[in-house]
Amino acid sequence: MKRLIILFVFLTVQLAFAQNALQSVQQAGVLRVGMEIGYAPFEMTNKEGKFVGFDVSIAEEISKRLGVKLELIDTPWDNILKDLVNGKYDIVMSGMTITSERKSIVDFSTPYFIGGQTLLVNKQKADQIKSFRDMNKPGIRIVTKQETVADNLVRNFFSKAQIILMNKPEDDIVAALIAGEADVFVYDFPYLAIAAQIHKESAVFLSTPFTYEPFGIAVKKGDGSLVNRLNDEINALKADGVYKKLYDYWFKGTDWEKEM
């Protein structure tokens, strides 16, 4: 009986924590958001040193609707979920794909963006690589960012090729591709679409995604109240037209490039 009482108390405490996660943010008066700055057009630094991008804009809207201030915390990608679990911030919003592996560590909001993997090919190799079907062979050098969805993808499906994993910002990986250190960069559609415009003289963009990848906002396990509120706000942003306005600005327009 004593063990049952202890178990009941433990579960009650856990439930109270889950129910009060949102309340803690509101009482603190600030929503702390972890993101790795440098993933265009989701999170970047403009000429004035301010963090900007699609994720930043969505986070600003959510914090405004929660009635709290927004604090953006730049964090290396390989530590981003560990730091969330350890309480460095309240949520992660950083162009993160919802995967079963990540769901075993954290909880996610409803998807707020649908992406997929695409290819940026060094122009010298464009005659050899015309789709993802051309990559799983010896002599093809595939580069991508370490600890990402693309990391697992290339190792599992292109094992015959030479895989190069880099723990660097995306811009540095593109620079390595252009310099001839790799033949093709496998990565998310939005980022490579921007990179392709910048490097159109040196690379070919194969823009049709060959995967389906929903992006979500990550929260600590058990933060059910915060997840539910985030879902409500994402749905509200889409319903009232604000989401479309921000999407069009960051993904269909080019005015923001003048800030960079």
Image: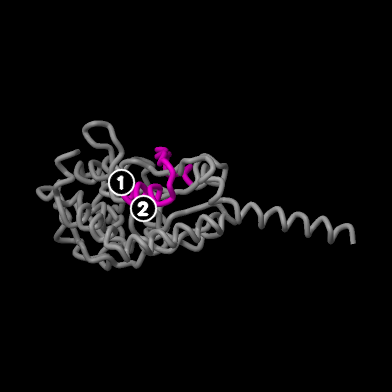
Residue 120, quarter of the rendered image: bottom left
Q: Which residue is mark 1?
A: 39
Give the amino acid type for the residue marked by disc 1 in the picture. Tyr
Report the label total.
Answer: 2
Residue 129 percent location from the top left of the image: 20, 61
In the depicted view, which residue is nearer to us: 254 or 210? 254
Residue 5 percent location from the top left of the image: 84, 58
Start and end of the magenta stretch?
Answer: 55-80
In the depicted view, which residue is nearer to us: 109 or 148? 109
Q: Is residue 125 within the magenta segment?
A: no
Q: From this viewpoint, which residue is outermost toward the top?
A: 48
Of callouts 2 and 1, the N-terminal one: 1
In the depicted view, which residue is nearer to us: 74 or 71? 71
Between the residue at mark 2 and the residue at mark 1, the CA separation in whole angstroms equals 8 Å
Q: Is residue 68 within the magenta segment?
A: yes
**Can residue 57 be seen from the camera position used here?**
yes
Circles 2, 1 touching at the beta carbon (< 8 Å): yes
- Residue at screen point 75% across, 54% down: 10
Residue 136 percent location from the top left of the image: 32, 63
Screen quadrant of the N terminus:
bottom right
Q: From this viewpoint, which residue is outermost toward the front?
A: 67
Would you say 7 lies left or right of 118 here?
Answer: right
- Residue at screen point 53% across, 51% down: 22
Q: Which residue is mark 2?
A: 95
